[in-house]
Image: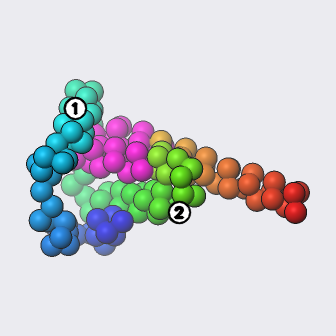
Amino acid sequence: MLVALQLVVGRRCIRLPARWQRLELGAPSRQKLVTALLRRIRWFERFSRPRASRLFEHGVTRSVFGVLVFGLALRAFLAPPFSGLHTLPSLGVVVIGLGVLLRDLLLAVLDALLGAIGVSTILAIGNLTVETAKHVL
């Protein structure tokens, strides 16, 4: 959410907290995670192409992606605990980031839709839960 807010206000250089900057991704305890993550990133790179890459040079585009990422991250954060409903919005955030890094508008837009499906699912289940609670009580 911190990175998304910086994109929304149009920062070209993202600032991270010092604690995050000191985080060592190559530590032995994280090696399995990093290996799996890199394998997935390479999979996306094989199918990604620079599509509408000039669009990524505009501050408005960064702001739009920032708003999308912030909304999806907030929705993932507000999902009920242990429900698994945070997965699709979180995945949308990650892959939107990959789409921006790879300068692939199609990938970024498709993953924004994936995140939107996750948000819709959370809202639908939440509404169903409230309606069920009204009938039970």
Q: Overall secondary structure of the magenta stretch?
A: helix
The reply to whether the magenta stretch includes residue 52 is no
Residue ID for mark 2? 78
Q: Quadrant of residue 107?
A: top left
Under circle 1, the secondary element is helix
Cα–Cα gap, marks 1 and 2: 29 Å
Query: How far across and down, in percent of the image, does residue 131 sit?
Result: 81, 56
Badge 2: few (under 14), some or many (20 or more) residues near its Cα, within 10 Å? few
- Quadrant where the N terminus sits is bottom left
Left/right placement of residue 42 relative to residue 105 reads left
Left/right placement of residue 98 relative to residue 64 reads left
Residue ID for mark 1? 39
* Segment colored magenta: 90-113
Q: Quadrant of residue 58?
A: bottom left
Badge 1: few (under 14), some or many (20 or more) residues near its Cα, within 10 Å? few
Left/right placement of residue 117 relative to residue 97 reads right
The reply to whether the magenta stretch includes residue 110 is yes
Query: How far across and down, in percent of the image, does residue 38 sit?
Result: 20, 37
